[in-house]
Amino acid sequence: MNKRPKRVPVSIAYSIGRQKFSKEPDDHDLGIIRRISELPFPNDLPMNSMPDSQMTRVGRMKTTNTAAIHHMFLPRAAQAMGLLWQKAKEHRDPRTRNFLLFMVEQAIWTMSILNRNRPSGFSQVNQYLSGVFYVASQTAECSPWYVLEGKLSRLTKAFQSYRPKRVTAITTGSATNMPIPTESVDYIFTDPPFGENIYYADLNVLVESWHGVRTDALPEAIVDRVRDKSVFDYQKLMTESFAEYYRVLKPGRWITIVFSNSRAAVWNSIQVGLQQVGFVVAEVTALDKKQGSFQQVVSPNAVKQDLVISAYKPNGGLEKRLAERGAAPESSWDFVETHLRQLPITKRKSGILEMVVERDPRRIYDRMVAWFVRHDFPVPLSTEEFLDGLRNRYPERDGMVFLPEQVAEYDRKRAQAAQAPQMELFVSDERSAIDWLMDFLRKRPSTYQEVHPEFTTQVGAGWRKHEERPELSALLADNFLRYDGSGDVPSQIHSYLSTNFKDLRGLEKDDPRLKAKAKDRWYAPDPSKAKDLEQKRERSLLKEFENYKSAPGRKLREFRLEVLRAGFKNAWGAKDYKTIIGIAQKIPDEALQEDEKLLLWYDQALTRMEADA
């Protein structure tokens, strides 16, 4: 037997003229409600069951046993909605019939038990939570006339004033196959599903049941545990959609994607999907919509602000030159030149100058790598070769790279700002730990004892689950230089000590007092020595990658992401796609999904293997 909570009327709100009143239901009121409940269900009231979904498995949909569409409506609302739907459906003129059905449709959510009671105000219209099926303990059942009167007025005004000046094409369908000519669109704005934040197909069932139709949930781009749709399934559908966007967009034009999800795996799937089809990401900024969604408000892990991703489709000349030159260093600098021209020169928020993250040297390198991988070319420059070339070719300000013709504008804006923009570094893996140490030691060459407590506070709860925690001593030895007290004090240490210690000011680099204070301090190498260190480190990483390849067992429980990144990159250059796929299968899915670089190599390796099969 289907048991559901008993609903008892406790208060009636009504108005006479402009005066508003409330009363407890009396015997006459209760009698009317009882007689309505004894009526048979109206013919047009949908009786189908709610489909199995994430929203019906948990929360108050489950505890209230709201298992069918007709369970969503109390007797009076069911009778009213059934009659309204019948009258609208019976109208002979097709256009008017569609208008009437559209109007009645606007009342479905409000007339259901999803409409919550809100004691703070008299109006109880549209008090349901958007984006979720939530049955409150106290519901507000409105008069259909009260619900529809305001909607009718607004709809009438909207259509009366609508005078189209040009033909507008509106279509509904899958973004993976759009009926739009190739390279015909000037600009794309898209607000795709955010992973598993909102279950659109499931939410549609309440209204669609009245129409007797159902959304095909199979091609829906979503992460859904009930339908066994993983992040990889979501990424595949999003990539197919982005490929269509890329096809219809004119060369040299832009796409804007609004996105919000706290899971790194979902965020990476969006970025990798964009890069796979040929888009180049130019900027990621926050969009404060002021009012958050239900998930954004209640979930402790939810991103409170949406992100706006700006990406461009290269104008064709860059790709043509890449095809002519191939994987040559000149192709790398051609990409950088083109990419820097697309990036904003400055960013301000609340009057404060912010970092343009896409101008960070390592971020530019990542974009360049993705560009070559997407076009099935080996990456022509190592990390340090690229970073060294970047320093020699382009001016750098506050950790950001500019074209020579852009730097004057930045200098002018920087002179007007109270302080330089700061890069926020969050230590979560070996690479970010190295970046944090680089930033720290550039400002403050320090001994191991001085670095250790500072470093320990950074490597906290945010460390990635499967990432092996490296020893600080190993990170310092592999990536930085230590002054052992012999020879002149390096310029980096000399500059720091003479600036911050009064008794050391004005001393020569070979002064015994300066050398004693400088002894055993770690410091960031200058570019001429950084390249040698990077090559030494890469050899060490690739040697450890060989151990991963030969490791017994099917899974690697702990590993170094830097080893995997170096190994995947090296295997890609050798067209050894089998190794990339084999190692990827040894690590947990979430570890692969949560690293943009690994995911890019892996997806491209799969694509090449399928193409060669």
Image: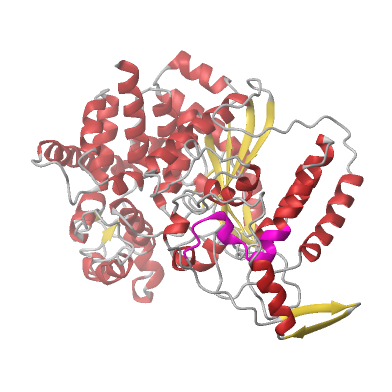
Quadrant where the C terminus sits is top left
Q: In which image quadrant can residue 570 be found?
A: top left
Which portion, as a residue range, is magenta? 65-80
Query: Magenta stretch containing residue 74, yes or no?
Result: yes
Coordinates of residue 509 in the picture (x, y in percent): 30, 60
Coordinates of residue 452 in the picture (x, y in percent): 25, 68
Pick the front one: 181 or 478: 181
Total labels: the figure holds 0
Q: Is residue 102 above or below residue 539?
A: below
Report the coloring of the rendering: secondary structure
Coordinates of residue 125 in the picture (x, y in percent): 73, 67
Quadrant where the N terminus sits is bottom left
Pick the front one: 219 or 416: 219
Would you say 417 lies left or right of 527 here? Answer: right
Q: Is residue 396 visible?
A: no
Q: Residue at x 58, y 61 (%)?
A: 72
Residue lying farthest to the left in this orientation: 552
Q: Is residue 522 visible?
A: yes
**Secondary structure that dominates the magenta span:** helix
Q: In which image quadrant can residue 549 be found?
A: top left
Q: Is residue 51 above or below residue 37?
A: above
Pick the front one: 525 or 340: 340
Coordinates of residue 512 in the picture (x, y in percent): 23, 67
Q: Is residue 322 above or below residue 68?
A: above
